[in-house]
Amino acid sequence: MRLLTADQMRRLDRLTIESGHADGTDLMERAGAGVVRSIERRYGPVLGLRVLVLAGPGNNGGDGFVAARHLQARGADVQVGLATERARVKGDALSHLEGMEASSLRLVELRSVADLAKLVAARDQWDFALDALLGTGARGEPEGLIAECVQTLRELDEQGTPVIAVDLPTGVDADSGAIARRAVRADLTATFGSPKRGHYLYPGRAFVGALEVVDIGLLSLESCNVECKVRLATPRAMAALVPVRDPRAHKGSAGRVLVIGGSRGLSGAVALAARAATRTGAGYVTAAVPERVNDVLELKLTEEVTVPCAETARHSLSIQACDRILERAEHSQAIALGPGLSRDDEAAELARRVYAEARCGLVLDADGLNAFAGHTEQLDRGARVLTPHLGEMERLCGTSTEEIETRRIDAAIEWAETWRVTLVLKGAPTVTAAPDGRATVNPNGNPGMATLGMGDVLTGVIAALIAQGLDTYDAARLGAFVHGMAGDIAAERLGMHGLTASDVLDAVPAALKELVRVRDEALEKRARRGM
């Protein structure tokens, strides 16, 4: 499923109309009717329910007029307030305003805060309130009476009235997810054609509520020559990427992963990454660690092999271990480089050399990333995945975490293209970007995952998927989805408070099992259609 910008949505809408495929009034009719269907799917029949519709003068208001007419036709008690003079309503919105009035539904022009208060007081309680004030094209702070309507919807929400946003909650930016000082907090948002970036980017995502995508009959992006390389990860799309295990598989053919890292005080990071690789299906996992860390890893790891390597005086990997590690890398399909590595100068030098010389796929994380701060010209080395959080990203590119966060999708794409790597920008949401401009936004995961070791688990998951034959982009985006899904499974079982990386690691097989079920179900449906 694609995530569109406001500009892409406007172009798609315009080209659909210009092609003669549908006119503006038809699209608006389908949109408003779709809002009502979304309400009924989520809440049930609206017969006898009291619904307040607050509309603006533009197309978003037009969608609201259509929704009001359909709600009344289904037996709802509907009151419609227009947050401007009626004379400002033009075009398709005016046509549907006149159609609403022809159905005996009266419009209340709101000229003042007193008019708004009187309309809200017309019923002692509202069962639903519709936000049809501003659409995806709006920017900046709502002003004047629109802002007062936003405040009213916030107050109704606080009183327990479900608020339904038409296309996008007013005050939420469609592209960045930024919110105005006053923004509508919706329980349900019904959007049209495709979801927008702002539906899934924080802080706006917290104002969207449940999201329903309404098909209004727009032309496809391809037929309109509108390019959109940003997609939302969905269970069905991710399920199709899960590796299929050969019935003749053995541990050597199921994928060999080499985890490189560890230092005094940071042995747990290597253990988590190695165990995660095994739990994701890698057949043979090896951990290359400093000599004095090896004994600890022997106790922590049961199914994985450890390789003690030369170390520095501070018990980090020494550059003298490089040849032995590269020899091991020759027999691996994927490397996880960096968990627990430390910031020792020799360990950093080793990381840069392994990154440059290893010929298999490689996932770079944690202090492996920090080793390239000031050396980013060395990152362009083929099949590489970088998994930075915002702090690590700031150290690599020199851009503040605040600026990266406000441009999370575009920043990930730009740096993936610059460094010619697959970049997994961790956070809420995690964005995976390929060097060719493609990107996938991950919608799952939860705040309980904000603990030590979660990134190490993700690194092991991605490395295992590369070792099982996926290219770096598919392995990274599937890995992010599996990781988030496992976090949700663990949180459902244990709750978010006290959730640990080990809890998520142990839920990885369950996440993969569920995706295999989704894939098999889709294949079965396809087979039945072909009969």
Image (cartoon, rainbow, N blue to C red):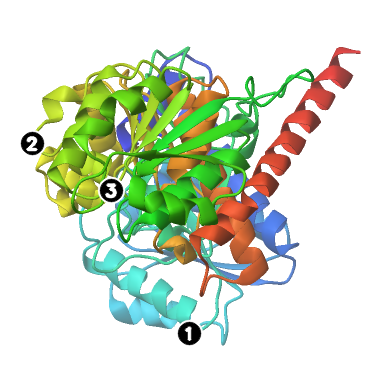
Instruction: Give the mark nearer the N terminus: 1 vs 3.
Output: 1
- Is 420 drawn above or below residue 134 in the view shown? above
* Gap between marks 3 and 2 measured at Cα: 40 Å
Q: Residue 254: horizontal and vertical position, in percent?
A: 64, 24
Tell me the quarter of the image containing the C terminus. top right
Q: Which mark is residue 171?
A: none
The single residue placed furthest to the right in the displayed view is 531
Res. 173 in view: yes
Give the quadrant of residue 19.
Answer: top left
Residue 359 in the image: x percent, y percent? 36, 15
Residue at numbered disc 2: 374
Viewer-closest of 93 and 87: 93
Residue at (62%, 30%) from the top-left corner? 283
How far across and how far down the image is residue 233, in percent?
A: 52, 37
Residue 69 against residue 112 in the figure, above or below: above
CA gap between label 1 and label 3 equals 28 Å
Q: Which residue is mark 1?
A: 121
Tell me the quarter of the picture where residue 518 sits.
Answer: top right
Pointer 3 residue: 138
Give neighbour class at mark 2: few <14, some 14-19, many 20+ (Cα, 10 Å).
few
